[in-house]
Amino acid sequence: MEIDAPGDAASENQIEQIDLHRWLTMSSSDYRRLTSGTALRRASRWQLLRNAAIAAGNCGDSSLVEPLVRLLSNSKYPIVRGHSAWALGRYRSVDAVRALDQAIFDEADSEVRIEIQHAQAEQLNHEADETKE
């Protein structure tokens, strides 16, 4: 069974694919619809968003930069913003670099700012490695 959006029915651990773009843009109503009557309800919305951000950072799909940028700038959850920054640090796109550069000035949470700085450093390290090659 393929699950491509929050709100689709899951059946007996038969998840083959998750559409991370849809999970990264999951609204509160999407969360309630997805988790209603399931064990997923044990995970809060911020936990699912954080996990989706981690998965997005690991998968390397550049189409996920835009929803990660939105989470970094708009999520009310600092932990989601921090993990979105981490994920963006793994991308080499201009949009990811710009989002991190802007977020370092806009972010009020000190722990999220530290994560943004780490993400920027990771981007610089990869640029330096590419220059050596």
Image (tube, grey):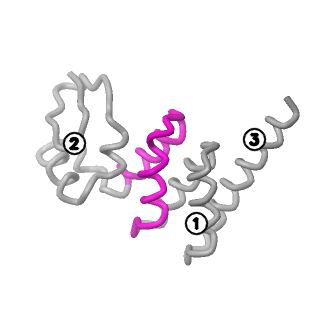
Q: Are marks 2 and 1 in contact (CB under 8 Å)?
A: no
Main SS of the magenta part reads helix
What residue span does the magenta drawing correspond to? 47-76
Percent x, y of residue 117: 69, 61
Find numbered disc 1 in the image and state the secondary structure of the residue it sits on.
Answer: helix
Q: Residue at x 88, y 34 (%)?
A: 132
Which marked residue is nearer to the observer: mark 2 or mark 1? 1
Of callouts 3 and 1, the N-terminal one: 1
Cα distance, mark 3 to mark 2?
Answer: 39 Å
Left or right for 34, reference 44: left
Q: Which residue is mark 3?
A: 126
Question: Circle 2 sits in a helix, a strand or a loop, which is it?
Answer: helix
Estimate how packed mark 2 is, as few (under 14), some (14 to 19) or many (20 or more) residues with alpha carbons within 10 Å. few
| Residue 5 figure quarter | top left
User: Residue 39: which numbered mark, if any?
Assistant: 2
In the image, what residue type sits under mark 3? His
Neighbourhood count class around disc 3 (C-alpha, 10 Å): few under 14, some 14–19, many 20 upward: some
Is 84 or 46 nearer to us in this picture? 84
Foreground tag (3 vs 1)? 3
Residue 41 screen position, x and y as percent: 22, 50
Rendering coords of residue 63 (x, y %): 45, 40
In three-dimensional space, the C-alpha distance between marks 2 and 1, rounded to whole angstroms, equals 29 Å
On the image, numbered disc 1 is attached to which residue? 112
Query: In the drawing, does residue 45 fall left or right of residue 62?
Result: left
The residue at the far front in this view is 94
Q: Residue at x 17, y 43 (%)?
A: 7
Closest to the camera, between mark 3 and mark 2, is 3
